[in-house]
Image (spheres, rainbow, N blue to C red):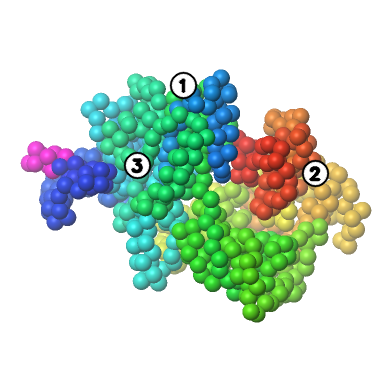
Amino acid sequence: MSKEYTDLVATINQWNVAYHVLDAPMVSDAEYDLAFRRLLALEAENPALITADSPSQRVGAKPIDTFRKIEHQVKMLSLDNAFSLEDTVDFFEKAAKELALNLNELAVYSEPKLDGLAIAIHYHKGILVYAATRGDGQVGEDVTHNIKTIQSVPIKLATDNPPDILDVRGEVFMPKIAFEKLNRLAQQNDAKLFVNPRNAVAGTVRQMNPKIAAERDLQFIPYGLGEYSNEQSFSAHSEVMAYLVSLGFKKNAHCYAFLGSVAAFEKNYTEMVRLRDDLPMEIDGIVYKIDALQQQARLGFTAHHPKWAVARKFPAEQVVTQLLGVDFQVGRTGVLTPVARLVPVFVGGVTVSNATLHNMDEIERLGLHIGESIVIQRAGDVIPKIVKVVASGAEQLPISMPERCPVCDAVVARIEGQVAYSCTNGLLCSAQSAERIRHYASRKFMNIQNLGPKLIEQLYGLGMIKTIADIYTLKVSDIANLEGYGEKSAQNVIDSIVESKTTKLATFLSALGIHGVGEEGAKNIANVYKNIDALFAAIDAIPDAFSDDDLAVFKDNIPNFGLVMSKNVVTFFKDAHNRSIVSAILAAGVVLEHTDTASNQAPILAGQTWVLTGTLQMPRQEAKAILERLGAKVAGSVSKKTHCVLAGENAGSKLADAQALGVAVMDEAAFLTLING
Ligand code: IVH
């Protein structure tokens, strides 16, 4: 019986590889099902037989109740982007120069850039032990239960001589056909559609119950290694890839090496663009990697990406559609954001019916009116954006900011010193309250692990939490009766609220979501006042009907604090409602600790000049404060002496200046990695 069992395991595994890895099925579905049922019967009869590599073990895992954290021994980095042939050639010319070589002496390996989710799969002596998401690069989440269901992921490596440790890095993706099937099904069931295959992958890999992943056709293709034990030795990336294929991983098709030259990069790009639509999966560009591992090692990494690889992105697809109208959405801080409603149109792999307009200045800059034909573009996960107006429609209507908040009907006013407008109802506007609660509880702030956005929405909708203070009055019985919850999971929520109660003063201040006060601003306040009572005392010393002059002492007391930020903080804490919420939170046992944070960060940008442009997620004041704390000067215009331009959304002439002068440009994500790393 044991021989029958082991033979059956080997046979089914071989069929699986043939079907899922090699795309060359060996048997009919009926024959496969019969064998699989026999395997399950044998395992049911004698559970002691079950081996780790049995195909039944892929889908058998029980749902998990929380995502365990996993530390990556080798950091999972992202890639630098190139948007043109010139960018690409520049990147490798710089690398060649650093290696004292000519461009045409560099062997470059080209791979399709799969548009999915980065995953690390860890093998110990050839057996899959865990799989983790990238997370922040250093620490990811354990998603083994879902990754094991992917048939193209070997549970056991196909070798008699497995390495002790092998951390395989690659992309989990959903083939185009599987994505279409999934959305067809969602449509039939009146469920929410996924916007693109990548979101579908992310949504699937982060499910607690592996049954869902098992039902969706996810695939995995490796693109490199993290940690591996030193009995393995490779001299080139292409060798690593061949080794991984020999271990039973699926091959990324259309990969090859060539010697660097303008013509070779151009030829490769034209070829890949031509291939793109016919590939079974979405690709959003090409990854070029220097093949020789020694050369890679000599070049090394920046905080954000390797200096030996670059992603040449495909341009965003543009299409023409019509602007039907503009809605105004109210965000967490009360800011009203115009959102364009469009005649639905297929672009960048998805049907788009909305586009963000950022603010009224953007509408003016575009010269936009309702009814007009417009060009929109969308690339990857970027929110669709309106590029320009192409023709005026028959009926043209102007777009204006509403005078009253579309959610709570309070007066809308322009925020001083900014282009944005905001609802004036503070913590009482319901759009703001739900968003504020989400912000407050999120991982980055109070980190209330089991109080996620969905539960908050449910509790908010039922009127069980109206403000952030209400979080602390929740009881197990409030949650246990909700859909999808029971006693145990409700207790987990309450436990995580209790666990979150001790935090840093700075974290708490940024969790409150005071307009314009980000993490850096909050740290600066905390470093000065050290406890919340001292902060309150300082604010209480300012007259209620304060003038700008009354704020001078408060403002000057805090490094890198401007007048607008001071005004926002003082107004926030002078508001009786806000103050009572904070008091209730403290009365509920939230403990705010403090340790100085500013002084222990090295001035890594000393002597550099930076320029800020475009719309950043973090308040501009904050970006400036961070740069200054790290030793940089912040200038208003770009010159040859500028070291780097930090460019947000809709960056204009300063970005163009930087490009013309060959000054480095960094986006906000890279900037965050730099400062946090
Ligand atoms: S190499 C240290 N190769 O693209 C180098 N990445 O935008 C790590 N990706 O995080 C990446 N296909 O998730 C590499 N052939 C490929 C890839 C690839 C897709 C993803 C990967 C990475 C992201 C960067």
Q: Residues within 10 Å of mark 2 (few under 14, many from 20)?
A: few
Q: What numbered label is drawn on residue 2?
A: none
Residue 41 versus residue 312: which sits nearer the camera? 312
Residue at point 51% right, 48% down?
A: 314
Asked whether the viewer can see residue 506, the reply is no
- Amino acid type of the residue tagged 2 in the rendering: Gly
Q: What numbered label is drawn on residue 253?
A: 3
Residue at point 46% right, 40% down?
A: 267
Residue range corresponding to the magenta coloring: 1-10
Residue at point 75% right, 74% down?
A: 403
Q: CA distance from mark 1 to mark 2?
A: 42 Å
Left/right of residue 157 with respect to residue 333 in the rendered view: left
Q: Secondary structure at mark 1?
A: helix
- Front label number (1 vs 3): 3
Residue 193 versus residue 140: which sits nearer the camera? 193
Task: Write down the residue under mark 2.
Answer: 636
Task: Write down the residue under mark 1.
Answer: 294
**168 relative to 326, above or below:** above
Across and down, in percent, residue 157 comes to 27, 34
